[in-house]
Amino acid sequence: MFTWFRRLLPREEKFFDLYARHADIIVRGAEELCGMLQGGEAVRRHYPNVLAAEDEADAITREVVQAVRRTFVTPFDRGDIQALIGRMDDTIDQMKKAAKAIMQFEMTEFDSDYQRMGDAVLRSAHLLRDAVPLLAEITPNAGRINELCEQIRRVEGEADDIHDAGVTALYHQCRHDALRFIAQREVLDQLEKVVDRFDDAANEIEGIVVEHV
């Protein structure tokens, strides 16, 4: 009787489609941020696209929250649904902060450490996009999901090392220019935080897998 009753209740089947769309936007935001790190005129050319991607991602996040409120039957715990889209949205929010820092400090030249950080952001974005659709069938995909999350964790470790080496290099380059050191370190810090946010999203995904396998 209860099974029959559940079939009559409001059901939301598009959560995974929304996650997939959000993940696509995250990848686009990462590509645009990497474009900024090419320097020169590319900084101003790609900056508006980072902001636009963040706006689109926010709209999908709101759509997910609204869908949770109107849906009785959800694919997994509604708290987890909201937490995951929140962690995903944190990644592109942090990209926006990094892009704004670049503009505020008028940076137009970036050495290899910045570009390697951009590469870490982009790799993390692709890994997240690969992992999210697999949540539609958690049990058979649990191993692959965990593997992708572990890869994000490894990229995060690499980004930490790049960040630390970059700060050391900046210290030696900017011994007599404290303002330059502060500005360039801030951008490097913001880029490192982007990768941290991907690690947070991976942790959220792993928690969902643990609960459902």
Image (cartoon, rainbow, N blue to C red):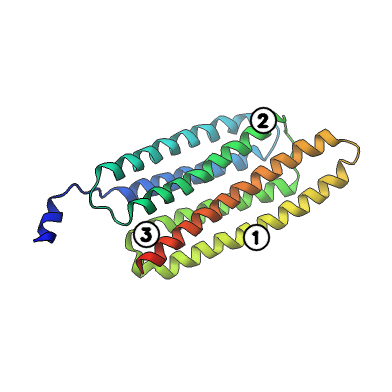
Give the residue at x 42% y 44%. 22
Provide the residue designation for mark 1. 157
Amino acid type shown at disc 3 = Leu
Disc on res. 54:
none
Between 19 and 10, which is closer to the camera in this rendering?
10
Q: Is residue 134 left or right of residue 118?
A: left
Q: Earlier in the sequence, mark 3 or mark 2?
A: 2
As displayed, is residue 4 above or below residue 85? Answer: below
Badge 2 marks a residue whose secondary structure is helix
Amino acid type shown at disc 1 = Gly
| Res 133 visible | yes
| Res 42 visible | no
Of tags 2 and 1, which is closer to the observer?
A: 1
Q: CA distance from mark 2 to mark 1?
A: 27 Å
Query: Going by the picture, which residue comes out furthest to the right?
Result: 176
Provide the residue designation for mark 2. 103
Provide the residue designation for mark 3. 135
